[in-house]
Structure formats: C-alpha cells, structure tokens
C-alpha cells in the first residue's frame, strides 16, 4: 500500500472507531427509552423506532468489526488487502435494514387491519420521540463531518443511516401528535412510513455495496483525472484501455501506455514506473498496473508468424560466421508493419592500419533480410573503446551488402 494511502487508512480507522463508539452509546440509551416508553405509552410507532435503534446498534458493531479487519495488511490469501471487508459490511447492513423495514411494515399493517383495538397514546411517547429526533439529528451532523474528513464511504453511509433515523423519529412524532389529537390510526401509519424508509435505505446501501463487489468502475470524471495523470508522464505518448474497480474506499487501476517502440526495455519500464508513481499521488488509488505498448494494441497487432529472437540471432550469426564474425548485439522490433532488425557488429581488425586489415569478403544482407522476412534490416558497428575506457560508439551501416575490405566507410547496394 502506498504511504499516502496507508496514512489515510490509519486515520480513517481511528475516526471510525471514535464515531462508532459515540453512536453505540447513544443508540443504546435511546433504544431503551423508545421500547420501554413505547410499550408503556401504547405507541407502536415509538416501539418500531426503538427496533430501528436496535438495528442501528447492531450495525454499529458490524462497522467496528469491518473497520478492524479492513485495515489488515495484504497476505497470501488477500493480495490486494482487506478493504472490501467494508463493502461486505455495507451489504450486510443493507440486508439488515431491509429485514427490519419489512418487519415494521408487516406489524403496522396488522395494526391498521384492526383499527377498533388501537389504544390511546400517552403524552410521554411524544417527549421521547422529540428527544430521539434531536439526538439523532445531532449524531448525523457529527458523524457526517467526521466521515467526510476521513473520506470513508462506509462511514458516510452510516452517517446517513443516522439521518434516516432522525427522519423516522420526525414521522413518529407527527404520528403521536395525531394520535393524541384523536386520530389514532396515525400512529400505525407513522410506523409503516418508518418501516418503508428503513427498507428503502437498506436497499440503497445493499445495492451500492453489491455493485462495488461486482467490480464497478469509478465515475467518468475520476477516471478522466487518472488518465490525465498518466498522460502527463514524460515519455508517455498515449493511454488506452484504462480500467478501474473499487476496493473498499480505494480504487485499483489498470492501463496501457504507448511509448516510443524503439526504446530499450529498461527505458520503457522506467516510464511505466514513473506513470504508476504519478497516478498513485491520487489518494483514491490503492495500486496501479501499467502495461507498456510500442503501438496501440487496441487497433494494431504484430503478425503472429514473425520469427523468434532465437531464430533471428541464429540466422544473423550464421550469415556472419563464414567471415569470422559474431554479432555484438541484435535488437529486434516486432511492429504491426512487420519485423525490424538492428545488428550491431563488434569493432574488428579492419579498423587497423591497411597492412593489418582482414578481408572476410562480402556479407549478403539482402538474402538475410529475405530469410528473416524482415521489413527492415540495419547494421551498426562499434567504433571501439577509447583510451579512457568509455563504452564503444556505434557507426551505422546503411548497406544491404557490406564489403569489409573498407569497413570504415558506409556502403550502399541495391
């Protein structure tokens, strides 16, 4: 995990523990008041809201467990870490809320089916409902502020869960007021509305979590920002096949970058690593996999029947062997237009004074090019090592047939 992501994760877990413990303490007190007073005051709506608070209490413990395990480091079974524990927790919370909401709707429906036996509601129910409303709204504002500071989707979801509690408490209070005014059916109606709100919130949480577990991509604007970071890397000519997926509150990114097809493998790797480090500066990115392309492989691919490096090297050295030479290096470029081969010859005695020149004869590069099926065949020759011990320079040979009786001069042949 990148250092920035690790710091962010540690801060998020610390905030999650603090806010969740506050929520647990408050929900435990409110749940007790709602259920006890609701039963005493004959308010089904208040009891339903108390069951809702019980569900909140359970969800808080789920958040604590998920928060603890999601911060674990990658291991042999979870190579990308455990951030999706939070997503699984959100899915569980969604299922829990749907179950609680459906239960509330069922209970309210049975009460509405028997309107004659709805008892009068006591005034104490209204006092508790107002107290719960104020408490839940204050809890929501506190949790949302902390969740946004930590940039945690799970904590934001839990905060809005608290806001749904406040909304349901408002409905309960209105229902109790109506029941106290003589319209007794308003209390079970309020309970049914609370049940619907809880079930709807559970569906939203569960659906979002299910989409993330199904590798849903990031939104277009975020993906465009990451693409721009890759394109800003020196050496990157273009970017294609950018793919993202959620990993808890972080994201994983895969991308193909286009570089100069004639550079070395090490330079291509350096550019790719530079691009990867640049995109990791976005705190949302947990890790990135960068693939290097010499051409856009979404639209162009090299022919499948091109010779392997082993065959190319063998053919080149076979052509050079009769003249007592062996290639110092063979550079091969597999491109959609065909095969390009660059042969580097070692510095030879032909560079010595004329009396020391060896005349190996002519090398037919045109025939070698035909055997390889190459589009282009270039020959370079080392100039030798300087007295200071520097690396040998390279002299181009542009010919298709080289006469080594004059190895210090370029030659041309048709």
Image (cartoon, grey):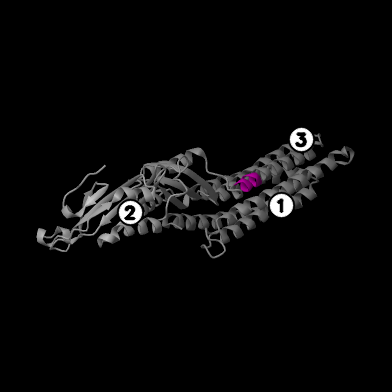
Q: Are there few (<14), some (14-19), or many (20+) residues within 10 Å of tag 2?
A: some
Q: Are there few (<14), some (14-19), or many (20+) residues within 10 Å of tag 1?
A: many
For the residue pair 189 and 197, the one nearer the viewer reads as 197
Q: Are there few (<14), some (14-19), or many (20+) residues within 10 Å of tag 3?
A: some
Q: CA distance from mark 3 to mark 1?
A: 21 Å
Which tag, 1 or 2, sits closer to the chain's start? Answer: 1
* Quadrant in the rendering for residue 315: bottom left
Residue drawn 79% across the image and 40% down it: 188
Element on which disc 1 rests? helix
The residue beneath circle 3 is: 178
Which tag, 2 or 3, sits closer to the chain's start? Answer: 3
| Residue 185, label in figure | none
The residue beneath circle 2 is: 331
The reply to whether discs 2 and 3 touch (Cβ–Cβ < 8 Å) is no
On the rendered structure, is 411 left or right of 70?
A: left
Q: Is residue 129 magenta?
A: no
Percent across and percent down for residue 35 are 75, 51
The reply to whether discs 1 and 2 touch (Cβ–Cβ < 8 Å) is no
Residue 131 in sight? no
| Residue 33, label in figure | 1
Badge nearest the viewer, 1 or 2: 2
Q: CA distance from mark 2 to mark 3?
A: 86 Å
The magenta stretch is 205-211
Element on which disc 3 rests? helix
Residue drawn 71% across the image and 54% down it: 32
Badge nearest the viewer, 2 or 3: 2
Percent across and percent down for residue 414 are 26, 42
Percent across and percent down for residue 236 are 36, 44
For the residue pair 190 and 249, the one nearer the viewer reads as 249
Q: CA distance from mark 1 to mark 2?
A: 80 Å
Q: Is residue 177 above or below residue 73?
A: above
On the rendered structure, is 64 left or right of 221?
A: right
């Amino acid at each position: 995990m990148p250092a920035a992501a690790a710091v962010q994760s540690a801060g998020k877990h610390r905030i999650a523990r603090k806010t969740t413990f506050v929520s647990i303490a408050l929900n435990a007190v409110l749940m007790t008041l709602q259920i006890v007073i609701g039963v005493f005051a004959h308010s089904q709506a208040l009891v339903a809201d108390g069951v809702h608070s019980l569900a909140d209490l359970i969800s808080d413990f789920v958040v604590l467990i998920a928060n603890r395990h999601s911060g674990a480091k990658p291991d042999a079974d979870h190579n990308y870490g455990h951030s999706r524990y939070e997503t699984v927790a959100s899915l569980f919370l969604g299922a829990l809320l749907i179950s609680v909401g459906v239960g509330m709707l069922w209970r309210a429906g049975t009460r509405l089916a028997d309107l004659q036996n709805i008892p009068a509601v006591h005034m104490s129910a209204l006092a508790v409902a107002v107290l719960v409303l104020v408490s839940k709204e204050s809890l929501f504002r506190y949790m949302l502020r902390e969740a946004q500071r930590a940039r945690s989707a799970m904590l934001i979801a839990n905060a809005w869960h608290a806001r749904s509690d406040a909304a349901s408490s408002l409905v309960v209070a209105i229902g109790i007021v109506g029941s106290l005014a003589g319209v007794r059916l308003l209390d079970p109606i309020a309970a049914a509305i609370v049940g619907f709100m809880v079930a709807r919130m559970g569906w939203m949480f569960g659906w979002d979590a299910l989409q993330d577990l199904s590798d849903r991509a990031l939104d277009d604007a975020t993906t465009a920002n990451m693409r721009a970071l890759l394109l800003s890397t020196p050496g990157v000519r273009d970017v294609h096949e950018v793919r993202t997926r959620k990993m808890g509150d972080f994201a994983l990114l895969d991308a193909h970058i286009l570089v100069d097809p004639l550079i070395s493998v090490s330079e291509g790797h350096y550019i790719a690593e530079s691009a990867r480090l640049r995109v990791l500066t976005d705190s949302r990115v947990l890790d990135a996999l960068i693939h290097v392309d010499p051409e856009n492989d979404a639209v162009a691919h090299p022919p499948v029947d091109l010779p392997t490096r082993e065959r190319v090297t063998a053919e080149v050295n076979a052509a050079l062997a009769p003249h007592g030479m062996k290639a110092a290096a063979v550079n091969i470029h597999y491109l959609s237009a065909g095969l390009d081969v660059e042969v580097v010859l070692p510095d030879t005695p032909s560079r010595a004074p004329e009396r020391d020149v060896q005349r190996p004869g002519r090398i037919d590069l045109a025939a070698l090019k035909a055997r390889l099926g190459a589009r282009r065949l270039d020959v370079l020759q080392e100039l030798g090592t300087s007295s200071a011990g520097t690396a040998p320079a390279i002299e181009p040979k542009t010919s298709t047939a080289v006469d080594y009786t004059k190895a210090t001069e370029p030659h041309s042949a048709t």
